Image (cartoon, rainbow, N blue to C red):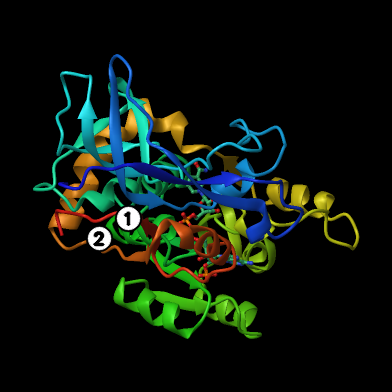
Amino acid sequence: MNATPVSNTRVLLASRPSGEPTQENLRLETVSLPTPGGGEVLLRTIYLSLDPYMRGRMNDARSYAAPVEIGAVMEGGTVAEVVESNDPDFSPGDFVLSHLGWQAYGVQPGRFLRKLDPARAPISTAVGVLGMPGFTAYAGLLEIGKPKEGETVAVAAATGPVGSAVGQIAKIKGATTIGIAGGPEKVAYLKELGFDSALDHRTPLFREELKSATPNGIDVYFENVGGAVWDAVRPRLNTYGRVPVCGLVSHYNETALPDGPDRSAQLMSTILTKSLTVRGFIQTEFVRTHYRSFQEDMSGWIRDGKLLYREDIVDGLENAPEAFFGMLTGKNFGKLLIQVGPDPTR
Ligand code: NDP
């Protein structure tokens, strides 16, 4: 990177959304460039990863992680280039996995960074298939879902980075795979990914189609979305079925419980009578035990053409809010990345 940076652009949380987030909740501003202190590194963002969990960080609610404060930079994983380094392990021009959030430049201690080798894999994959979303799929499916050969595994948001990896890993493990996505274009892509059945949850026939596609029921449902998909899947679950609860994206913008009778007793009864394992997880709990095998397995599967991935790259940090809002309703098609600055490796 030759140009000397002078200022930093960043996106702040301006106010907390109620329901669907809007442009008013986020504010773009330009400030002077931060200066790295001892052991710190000045970084230029190339890719910002947009992920559904960011919606939760906009709320002032207790969760597994603290909310973003009003006036603070929105949180997010990034792939960046080193501009200036006060850490002997990093030199200008190195590419790193970092957590700068929604900004064009940032400073982080070197000990928080992981160097990326562009010869090994495209650097963008460090926040996608070879990063947090890919790892979530790998650990959640294998550790909680435990698919066996011949079993049926279903997953929704199946063209996204988590769902697409879940389906393909399940296939590698010998399962029959049911991919669920929104719209005909995404459904066509699920077939390219090798799902045995590809279903559109937006059609009125979805429930019937799911029934026909699962004559032997469902043994593992990797829960990414909740809502109407979960309602359709629940009666198809087999005795001893496993449900890794990874995400509930259809509910993230809700401000109240849906109207209607309380159905929690019915749900508990299904769990009881079918001896289901329903287990929530946050991927970080598996990092120590599974990250190494994930890197080895996933890189190998990609290299051997057994696992495909798709990126949806939107140009410009100023377009991050719109792209993020769209992801929560299915407008993204693949791992959503913001190209914040040029990628010298492409
Ligand atoms: P995606 O890129 O798949 O984006 C979210 C997708 O959700 C949309 O593209 C859309 O796909 C689908 N969706 C949105 N609204 C609905 C709805 N009402 N009904 C059904 N589907 C809907 O996201 P990721 O792959 O990054 O994440 C998938 C899930 O994994 C999320 O719930 C996320 O929060 C969770 N997650 C959890 C982690 C953990 O540690 N537990 C870590 C990482 C992710 P479509 O158009 O196909 O419907």
Is 185 situated above or below 329?
Answer: below
Sequence-wise, the earlier of marks 2 and 1 is 1
Q: CA distance from mark 2 to mark 1?
A: 8 Å
Amino acid type assigned to the residue bearing label 2 in the image: Leu
Residue located 60% across and 79% down the image: 202
Amino acid type assigned to the residue bearing label 1 in the image: Ile
Mark number, residue 169: 1
Q: Position of residue 242 (x, y in %)?
A: 54, 49
326 with respect to 231 (left or right): left
Residue located 45% across and 69% down the image: 179
Is 82 situated above or below 162?
Answer: above
Is 278 situated above or below 91?
Answer: below
Is 338 situated above or below 38?
Answer: below
Question: Label 1 neighbourhood size at 10 Å, few (<14), some (14-19), many (20+)?
Answer: many
Instruction: Give the image quarter of residue 172.
Output: bottom left
Instruction: Give the image quarter of residue 311.
Output: bottom left
Q: Is residue 242 visible?
A: no
Mark number, residue 307: 2
Q: Position of residue 223 (x, y in %)?
A: 56, 54
Q: Nearer the viewer, mark 2 or mark 1?
A: 2
201 with respect to 213 (left or right): right
C-beta proximity under 8 Å, tags 2 and 1: yes
Which one is nearer the viewer's eye here, 170 or 239?
170
